[in-house]
Amino acid sequence: MTTASAGSAGELRRDRDAGWIGGVAAGVARRFGVDVTLVRLAFVVAAAAGGAGFAAYALGWLLIPAGDSRPSRVRIRTGRAAVEVALGTGLLLVAVLLTLRELGLWFSDAIVWPLFLIAAGGALIWRQSMGEPADTVGRERSASAAAVPGAVRAEAGPSVAAPGRAELAVAEGRRAAVAISRTGIGIALVIAAGVVFLQATGALGAARDVLLALIAAVVVLAVIFAPWIVRLLRSLTEERAERIRSQERAELAAHLHDSVLQTLAMVQRRAGEPTEVAALARRQERELRAWLSGRPAPGQSARLAGALEIAAAEVEERHGVPVEVVVVGDRELDTRHEAVVAAAREAMTNAAKFGGGSPVDVYAESADSRTQVFVRDRGPGFDTGSIPPDRRGVRESIVGRMKRYGGRARVTSAPGSGTEVEIVLEEEQ
Amino acid sequence: MTSPEPPHRPDPRVLIVDDHQLFRAGVRAELEPLLEITGEASGVDDALDAIEEQSPDVVLLDVHMPDGGGVEVIRQAAAVTETPPCFLALSVSDAAEDVIAVIRAGARGYVTKSISGDELADAVRRVHEGDAVFSPRLAGFVLDAFAGPAPQPESELDALTAREREVLQHIARGYMYKEIALRLDISPKTVEAHVSSVLRKLQLSSRHELSRWAAERGLDL
């Protein structure tokens, strides 16, 4: 039994593969080269003789680190299952202890009950502060870190990565809550152990006096040192705020240098080419606006408004026609709404190409379960009954695409009154 | 004088207030052939002096300036003259709270600086005639501010009517008032009435979003 396990025989390690419960007996047996059955027998005898075996086993489980082992097949996760298992184990132990008490195999109430409570509470605190949860966090972190580049590569882009990040944050929050409640229950159990012990030995009154004296001392010291502590804390906060301010200043300078100053330099060099200068200025303006309003930088928006702004900027740059975007309401992009953005981009491109250089107005409204985008130019317009077959843009990329995704698109135009494309997508039932 | 059109008022006299000299010069060059420019001002105090001395009809007002910006000019204008001019906000600002704050302080419209000279002159004339001027961007801001359920108890100032919403959506989509009238089968004057009504609600509503924005800019409206 002892041969299969990894790890040198010199160290005392719990052997979880060979063990029945926590591998304490198996680990001890391996370390000292005795048969594991003998060790187990010793624990059982000690347990029968007043419960010392339980305490010894529990201590061994807590204090002896686990040896390397295959991940156990049954992983107890946090949640209801874990609570039920813990409750069940606790009740079983209580039952065993009560049986032993009836049988007369018993030290005294003043020792066994507190020990039991301390063991339970201590186990909770210890497991929380060292042990498995830290492992779990690390593992899930690295797993999600591995998932993000994968998602980006899968061309779906940041829209896939973003929910992953949000989920991770939620999971982390839940873990923190679990950790706090676990530690809290553990501490309560340990304190209860102390109170039970004091009560049983009749020393509770004395302990209360000591506690009162202690509280009085703490209050006196707090009053004496309060101004000094407050001053210290305040100066620390001020220092921190100052550091943050200077960091922000440095960041601002770096950003302006990379963006605005670069653009100004380029504008000076190309002063003779007005269209190019105008395009440069528009692009810089968009970028700066996005930065000022805290929206994600161009090229990486996972929301409708941001994605439309990016599309507009690209069209504007390629065709040299101003595209004004107004968005009311916003929403996360899913595949269907990405189709809306793609169709809107196609409509903007058409408006820029055939709108006779007139400015393009884009209006998007996303509310309740409905997203609408209007793209309008004030160009010459055309007869919608006679879209030339070579104008695949309108038919395939706009109307066809929206139909495929369960939405619709309509082109309104007449010679002399401009063109408007309306794209509508309702939430799926 | 049998024409149903209202009598044509003389061209408005315009004061340009902006802290960027280059921008003032640009606007002046574009408007000079179309309207009468009384002068320029580069800050709040400057603007108040100019309003007192030149008594312009319309003030083209930059939203963002040192010492409080356009909001301060509008608030203090009543103290320096008995007949305060109309204000038209003109800004590159993208932030809804800045624009809404200027409107709530009393400006009769908001246009972005990318507007063409002709359109700007037209907007100035309309403001002078008592109309409200909404750019697509302002229409978007207003729709955003009035989105969601009205606060309790509901006042008629706290919600837009279906027709007002429709008109604003058309403005946001880039339609001119005349085109909107045609599309909705109403008269251009009715469109204008809807926009003016929205402006009134914007200035007087106690909607939470509007009040919050105003409060952030130090307005006790």
Image (cartoon, coloured by chain):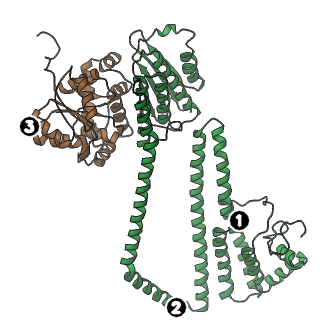
Chain colours: A green, B brown
Residue A337 percent location from the top left of the image: 54, 32
Query: Few, some or many C-alpha atoms within 10 Å of disc 1 (few <14, some 14-19, many ≥20)?
Result: few
The amino acid type of the residue labelled 1 equals Val
The answer to whether residue B152 is seen in the rendering is no
For the residues bearing labels 2 and 1, Cβ distance under 8 angstroms: no
Q: Amino acid at mark 3?
A: Glu
Check the residue under mark 2 and report the chain it is in. Answer: A
Q: Chain of mark 1?
A: A
At mark 2, the secondary structure is: helix
Q: Residue at x 72, y 89 (%)?
A: A107
Instruction: Give the residue number, with chain letter if any, for mark 3.
Output: B82
Residue at 13% x, 20% y is B10
Query: Which is more N-terminal, label 1 or label 2?
Result: 1
Q: Please report contact status of discs 3 and 2: CB closer than 8 Å, yes or no.
A: no
The residue mark sitting in front, 3 or 1, is 3
Q: Which residue is mark 2?
A: A205
Callouts 3 and 2 in the same chain: no
Q: Nearer the viewer, residue A111 or A250?
A: A250
Question: What x and y, as percent, mark residue A168?
Answer: 60, 51
Query: Residue tagged by mark 1?
Result: A85
Q: CA distance from mark 2 to mark 1?
A: 37 Å
Say which element carries label 1: helix
Q: Which quadrant would residue A43 be assigned to in this image?
A: bottom right
Mark 3 residue element: loop
Q: Looking at this view, is A258 or A218 the one in front?
A: A258
Q: What is the spatial separation of the Cα atoms under label 3 and label 2, in whole angstroms?
A: 83 Å
